[in-house]
Image: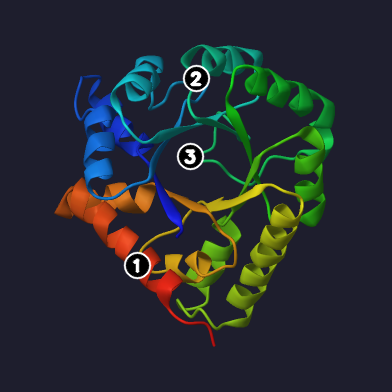
Amino acid sequence: MVELGVNIDHVATVRQARGTYEPDPVWAAVEAHLGGADGITVHLREDRRHIQDHDVRRLVELTHIKLNLEMAATDDMVAIACKIKPQMAMLVPEGRHEITTEGGLDLLAQEKRLRDVIARLADAGIMSSVFIDAELAQVEAAARIGAKVCEIHTGPYAAAFFDGGRDAQSPAVSEALQSIAAAGDLIRSLGMRFNAGHALNYVNVQPIAALPGVRELHIGHAIVSRAIFVGMRDAVREMKRLIRERVCQPTA
């Protein structure tokens, strides 16, 4: 069964907009868990634009499902992760001027540096993940540097889906899916876990959930957006239903 990791960054975004104490991301994590989430994802950005250090500490202490900490591969962030000890740390590219993470991490350009980071995380007992584009060379580099998990960036697929009239059979969508599937096959053949995420929503999630061997989908903005209207539990429950339905459909 494909697991769902719920990213709660934008609960903190609302809180930080007023510089107050609510809404509480930890409360959101509990509600997501009660709705069926298998894990929680947060991105502790260097500029602390939403999630704060104390949020991550409290999530580790107070939630009962696994925590995936997205982070830049900097010495400061590695030190924080090694102290807080989330169940998984995902290395992502980070730009101060981007609205959200844009594109996967270029492992080829910094293999030695990232190999050292992953070794430090492993020494602290933390599973390492890398967020990469659906490129076979990047997957091979992930294996070389010792990553245990590859999360494939689904943003290009989501853009093709939106631009192609929300038609999962359109040529652009099919091409994007084929690239992700090929990356997933290589990930698994190299002994790593195949996860996927970015810009997935209630309309486009099912073709990704149906890919062979995908283990986790990490989804945030769409779930938090729907939660404004229906509540976090129901928003998570509906996403889980869509994933479960697609996974359980017989293949042609």
Nearest to the eye among marks 3 and 2: give it.
2
Q: Residue furthest bottom?
A: 252
What residue is pinned by disc 1?
Answer: 242
What residue is pinned by disc 3?
Answer: 99
Identify residue type, mark 1.
Leu
Q: Quadrant of the N terminus?
A: bottom left
Residue 145 - label: none
Looking at marks 3 and 1 on the same chain, the residue that comes earlier in the sequence is marked by 3
What residue is pinned by disc 2?
Answer: 85
Q: At 20% from the left edge and 20% from the top edge, which residue is drawn?
A: 21
**Observer-nearest residue: 220 or 147?**
147
Q: Are marks 3 and 2 in contact (CB under 8 Å)?
A: no
Nearest to the eye among marks 1 and 2: give it.
2
Disc 2 secondary structure class = loop
Query: Residue 203, image x and y in percent?
Result: 38, 69
Disc 3 secondary structure class = loop
Query: Residue 106, image x and y in percent?
Result: 74, 40
